[in-house]
């Protein structure tokens, strides 16, 4: 586990944002041997705070990277509906 994410989760294991960010770090590193860990982290984030912007973005990102495009579109659609400031949602898809 990347050290910053590990520390954040250790400090607050109920922090959905920490799990969501960890999901994105794993995917950004391109280590797809850890894809199940990324899936698990995004599911944990979703369980803790299903409507948080970071959670929706991480969920869409992991679904996209695992080939679940229809579900990814739904997650990103919910994200876009949840905010008028789309900077958080667009950065992953550029």
Image (spheres, rainbow, N blue to C red):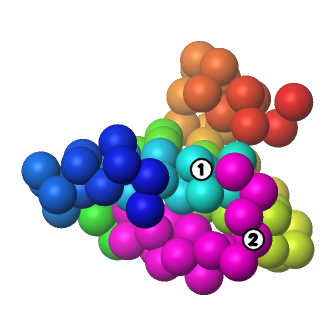
Q: CA distance from mark 1 to mark 2?
A: 12 Å
Estimate how packed mark 2 is, as few (under 14), some (14 to 19) or many (20 or more) residues with alpha carbons within 10 Å: some
Q: Residue at x 60, y 57 (%)?
A: 26
* Residue tagged 2: 32
Q: Residue at x 58, y 48 (%)?
A: 25
Q: Residue at x 59, y 17 (%)?
A: 85
Which residues make up the magenta segment? 29-46
Image: 2 above or below 81: below
Q: Position of residue 82 (x, y in %)?
A: 53, 37
Q: Position of residue 69 (x, y in %)?
A: 87, 68
Asked whether residue 94 appears in the rendered view, the answer is yes
| Residue 91 occupies quadrant | top right
Label whose residue precedes the other's in the sequence (1 or 2)? 1
Examine the structure image and report whether residue 1 is included in the region drawn in magenta.
no
- Quadrant for the N terminus in the image: bottom left
Secondary element type, mark 2? helix
Q: Nearer the viewer, residue 80 or 14?
A: 14
- Quadrant for the C terminus in the image: top right
- Determine whether, in the image, residue 41 is placed left or right of residue 12: right
* Residue tagged 1: 24
Asked whether residue 16 appears in the rendered view, the answer is no
Q: Nearer the viewer, residue 69 or 66?
A: 66
């Amino acid at each position: 586990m990347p050290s910053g994410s590990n520390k954040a989760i250790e400090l607050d294991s109920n922090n959905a944002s920490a799990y969501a960010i960890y999901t994105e770090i794993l995917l950004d590193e391109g280590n797809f041997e850890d894809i199940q860990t990324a899936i698990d982290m995004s599911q944990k984030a979703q369980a803790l705070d299903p409507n948080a912007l970071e959670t929706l973005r991480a969920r869409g990102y992991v679904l996209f990277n695992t080939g679940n495009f229809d579900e990814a579109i739904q997650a990103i659609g919910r994200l876009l509906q949840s905010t008028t400031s789309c900077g958080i949602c667009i950065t992953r898809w550029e």
